[in-house]
Structure formats: C-alpha cells, structure tokens
Amino acid sequence: MRDDHTTGTDPDAVTLGRIETEIALLMRLGEATRRATGTAEHRVLDRAAYVILRHLDKAGPQNVSALAARLNLDGSTVTRQVSALQRDGLIARTPDPADGRGTVISPTPAGLQRMAAVRAARTRLYGDVLADWTGDDRDTLANLLHRLNEALDARNRRR
C-alpha cells in the first residue's frame, strides 16, 4: 500500500507521509497478526502485562512511580495493571529498601515463565515472517526500529 497523503513535491514531506502510513499499518497488522496467531503462547499475557514483565526482567524491581515513568504511563494505569498481575501471581510486591513506606514490584517465576513463552512465540513468528530476508536486512530493521523507539521515547520524556 502506498498512500502518501501529501501534496506538492517536497521529498521530505513525501517520505514522512510514507513513514506515517507504514507505522499505522505496522500497528494494525501487528495486532491483527497477534490475534490471528493460533498458538496459546501468544495469549498467556496481554500486551500491558508483557511490557511490564519485560521491563522488570531487564531493569530489576521498581516502584510503581518509576515503572510508570519508564513506560510513559499514568501511575494509576500502572497501579491497575500491576494489581492484575499480582492477582494472577505474576508479580510480587516487597517493601522498598529505600523507603519502607513503599513497595517495589518484581516478577515471580510464573511471571517470568509466561513472559518467556510469549517472547519465544513472538520470536518464532517474526522468524517465519522474515524468513526470506537476509541477516543484514533483519539486523538493519532491528537497528532502525530501536532508533525509532529511542526517538519516540525521548520525545515523550521532553513533554
């Protein structure tokens, strides 16, 4: 699909219009692919739980405020998501060693196991989708997506 949504001949505007369209399609097709995938591993965690568990696995235990700031979400949203994860036995709360009045959140072994299952299923899926891409093309895509995510994150933090 090629839909530039731009008038005039400014090459930068045309390119940015293409990027906007491709990102919109990526988001829609990514969600549709997730829903259509028949394996149970894709469904053992919702998107929010997966992102929280991935972050905690990488960054270590954190309080809700730090987690909300890192994920660019409202604290009340993260509190609700964390409560659901705790109810399902996927995270644990322990006293915050830096401030005994608060708690820190960490993944449980069950949470890490579910997160690993989803990650493995997604890795297999993208391996299948990108099977005919060269290793260099896959590496380039990974690097460019990382740069895009960093730029989006930096923009959100400046606001």
Image (cartoon, rainbow, N blue to C red):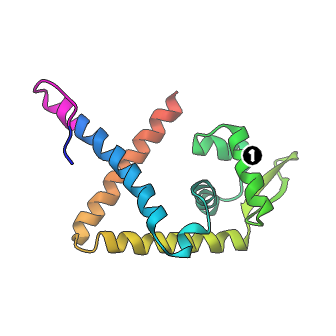
Q: Quickly name the residue at label 1.
A: 79
- Outermost residue toward the right in this view: 101
Q: Residues within 10 Å of mark 1 (few under 14, many from 20)?
A: some
In-image side of 95 versus 77 (left or right):
right
**Dot 1 lies on which element?**
helix
The image shows residue 67, relative to residue 157, as above or below, that is below
**Residue at image x 78%, y 66%?**
89
Q: Amino acid at mark 1?
A: Thr
User: Which quadrant of the view contains residue 112?
Assistant: bottom right
**Residue at image x 48%, y 62%?**
35
In this view of the protein, which residue sits in the foreground, 122 or 150? 122
- Outermost residue toward the top in this view: 8
Residue 87 is situated, as x and y percent measured from the top left of the image, at: 80, 60
**Residue at image x 12%, y 24%?**
8
In this view of the protein, which residue sits in the foreground, 57 or 80? 80
Residue 52 in view in this figure: yes
Residue 10 is situated, as x and y percent measured from the top left of the image, at: 13, 27
Q: Which residues are magenta?
A: 4-15
